Image (cartoon, rainbow, N blue to C red):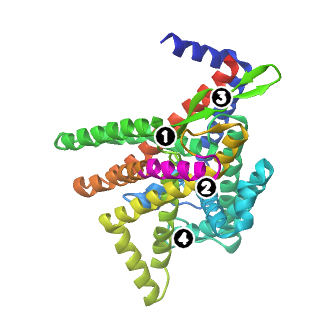
Amino acid sequence: MNNFWNKVKIIFTDPQLRRRIFFMLAFLVVFRLLAAVPIPGIDKEQLTRFLSNNQFFGILDIFSGGGLSNLSIIMLGVGPYITGSIIMQLLTIMVPALKRLYHEEGEAGRKKFTQYSRMLTVPLALVQGFGFLVLLEKQNVLGDLSVLARAVNLAVVTGGSVLLMWIGELISEYGIGNGVSLLIFAGIVAAVPTQVGQLLINYDQTQLPTYLGFLIIGLIIIVGVVLVTEAERPIPVTYAKRVRGMKLYGGVSTYLPLRINQAGVIPIIFALSILLFPQMIANFLTGMNGEFLHKIADFLTAFLNNTWLYSIFYFILVFLFTYFYTAVTFDPQELSKNLQKNGAFIPGIRPGESTALHISKILNHVTLVGALFLGIIAVLPLVMRSITGISALALGGTALLIVVSVVLDLVKKVDAQISMREY
């Protein structure tokens, strides 16, 4: 307990750490203010009717931080930026030049790689924004707008998405934590009071067992996420003895911690962003003329409305993205080189290629556990929704998973900052 209060004291007394935290909070407030500014020409009654019981827009509202529920200027949220990042990271597998840029050219290469992701965000935001605005017009949510008014709305929502991308990167650089994850977290938390209020207003004693079941599942998700996020697989490492001058260095044994879930909540966010595309295409094609287009829309709608097929596809995406993101961010070859340069080795394993293969084998095993866990936790609320019929469970489970993971990551970043100042 004393350790906790000491950390709180350091947070409020250290000028640099305090400045980082208040910088983050200030931009989260700006983000919430932007989410309350609507685009012009909205029919609020038609919007409320359109958004009711719509799982697709409920998921998208998570990415927009609540900006979609009132069609704010940031209604696209960070979705285009996340999609751009996914595309760029997928291209590292297919384009050797991008792989070298990301892995071998150091900090300068990664900055250039990030710049490409930013540039890709703009056309993605334009396409996604155009699709949404056309869909909303066909649903009579937006009035009969002129060509100029449509162009202005498209420019506004595209600019809003780019602005959120910039805010997220500012928080990552000058604040604490991952800026994009914190924006999603802030949008989820901001919606909690409204959801609790609606739950109390519509409270029905006959559904009490269902609410208790939802609470138990929520606690299981929280405990599971904490345990898996904190779990590590230690690899023993020994530093060889070296003589420099009259002193003997090395001979120390330590361990290399491999986290069970190296990717954190990123696979969930990636999978959800990919799942938005078929839902957006289905909604867009529904309003188009042509029998063939309607058949495609009906097929996509039938697939998305089938909870079991949707859940299986969602599970596979989360599972694959866990492996993919771990492979992109954690390079056993680079780690093996660093160990060899520092005179370290794994007992019983030859330095170099053998060490890289050994680390890769262990990493694949622990990532399997993390990928299975994330996939099960992701689809569990969907299965519960199909059993109980309460659509909020599907969104609630995903939102809870993101919130817990972001909070854990933020706590670790704050602890790291405090440790740096203590030493």
Pointer 3 local density, CA inside 10 Å: few below 14, some 14–19, many at least 20: some
Visible residue check, residue 40 = no
What residue is disc 1 on?
405
Identity, as a three-letter code, of the amino acid under mark 2? Val
Q: CA distance from mark 3 to mark 4?
A: 41 Å
Q: CA distance from mark 3 to mark 2?
A: 29 Å
Q: CA distance from mark 3 to mark 1?
A: 19 Å
Front: mark 3 or 2: 2
Circle nearer the N terminus (3, 2) = 3
* Residue 415 vertical position relative to residue 187 in the rendered view, above or below: above
Question: Is 421 included in the stretch rendered in magenta?
Answer: no
What residue is disc 2 on?
328
Visible residue check, residue 188 = yes
Measured as percent of width and height from the top left, residue 48 is found at: 43, 57
- Say which element carries label 3: helix
Task: Tell me which corner region of the image, top left, top right, bottom left or bottom right, holds residue 116.
Answer: bottom right
Circle nearer the N terminus (1, 4) = 4
Q: Residue at x 66, y 73 (%)?
A: 146
Q: Are marks 3 and 2 in contact (CB under 8 Å)?
A: no
Left or right, 77 with respect to 363, comes to right
Of 107 and 151, nearer the camera is 107
Magenta segment, prevailing SS (helix, strand or loop):
helix
Circle nearer the N terminus (1, 2) = 2
Q: Residue at x 46, y 85 (%)?
A: 293
Left or right, 254 with respect to 244, comes to left
Pointer 4 local density, CA inside 10 Å: few below 14, some 14–19, many at least 20: some
Q: CA distance from mark 4 to mark 2?
A: 40 Å
Of 1 and 174, nearer the camera is 1
Pointer 1 local density, CA inside 10 Å: few below 14, some 14–19, many at least 20: many
